[in-house]
Image (spheres, rainbow, N blue to C red):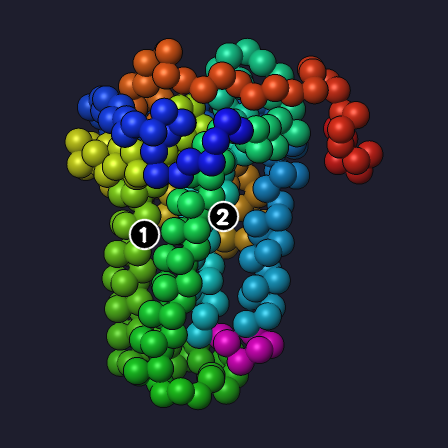
Amino acid sequence: MASFHVYAGATNTLEHPAIRRITVADVFDALRRGFDDFWDKPSHYVFLCLIYPIVGVFLITWTSGGNALQLIFPLMSGFALLGPFAGIGLYEISRRREQNLDTSWRHAFDVRHSPAIPAMVAIGIMLLVLFVAWLLVAQALYTSLYGPGAPQSTAAFFGDLFTTQRGWTLIVLGNLIGFLFALVVLCTTVVAFPLLLDCDVGAYAAIETSVRAVRSNPVPMLLWGLIVAIALLIGSLPFLAGLAIVIPVLGHATWHLYRKVVDVPADKKTPLPPSTGEGDDRHFPYWLRW
């Protein structure tokens, strides 16, 4: 890493990559390409992304046994706020695949060589702050309707949630507030992390480019956000196990969506980071080798 830079790129200048206009068909094509990337080596990506449903099950178990039932939905839906950062390794795999390079899952860790790591971490911290803010707002909404006490039991809580006016108020207002948080994340990060991986433009330019991408393509980008929300919901239904497939597909698709939306000149792109060589696992513990 040549220098520690966050706000701007390595040259300390603000870049403004050109934005292309895309259509709804481009969104579905990006999704198809994302599935193709996943299907190239699906077992690798399922293994890599199993951590998300495992963490999700742990959080549900913790909230159920820790008098925090009211936070189950905010925690589960909050994963979507952290998703753009969680997919960095998958963007790297798609980046390598489009250049016909080795796409073994260990290359997901090559992002540690990126000169834009400080900017990625900065935006990741921003997403974490939004995630925590969402949980605090969700808890405040629950307290305003139900009081400071925790739910007495799972059956009583969900029974009240779906059969009383305050329960439906919690559902409606909670989803509206959650939508606003998700919209902020979509507008500020929809192409931010793939752009930083592809071109070290700095955190400000990455966020600004994402905002311009949504502003120039409101319908396709809102459709993309809806697809992500529905896919995460479907993946969460069978005890969160489906997230091991949904997350890598969406991650790869995000890279292809970025490619369609943002026009980065070839001379501005960051070269692929050094690796240990095709098929060389010597730098990985034996239990991580494939």
Label 2 amino acid?
Gly
Vertical position of residue 229 compared to residue 4: above or below: below
Mark 1 residue crowding within 10 angstroms, few (<14) / some (14–19) / many (20+): many
> Magenta stretch containing residue 97, yes or no?
no
Residue 289, located in which quarter of the rendered image?
top right
Q: Is 192 left or right of 46, judged from the image as shown?
A: left
Q: Residues within 10 Å of mark 2 (few under 14, many from 20)?
A: some
Q: Position of residue 88 (x, y in %)?
A: 49, 35
Residue visible at 36% across and 87% down? Answer: 147
Count of picture labels: 2
What residue is shown with label 1?
A: 182
Residue 105 figure quarter: top right
Q: Nearer the viewer, residue 156 or 21?
A: 21
Looking at the image, is 239 positioned above or below residue 279?
below
Q: Secondary structure at mark 2?
A: helix
- In which quadrant of the rendered image does the C terminus lie? top right
Q: Nearer the viewer, mark 1 or mark 2?
A: 1
Residue 32 image point, x, y percent: 42, 25
Q: Is residue 88 visible?
A: yes
Q: Position of residue 249 (x, y in %)?
A: 48, 34
Q: Nearer the viewer, residue 206 or 35?
A: 206
Q: Earlier in the sequence, mark 1 or mark 2?
A: 1
Mark number, residue 235 = 2
Would you place residue 157 above or below residue 128 in this image? below
Q: For the residue marked with disc 1, what is the amino acid?
A: Ala
Q: Is 14 on the left-hand or right-hand side of 63?
A: left
Residue pictured at 66% horizontal, 39% vertical: 47
The stretch of residues the image draws in magenta is 64-69
68 in magenta: yes
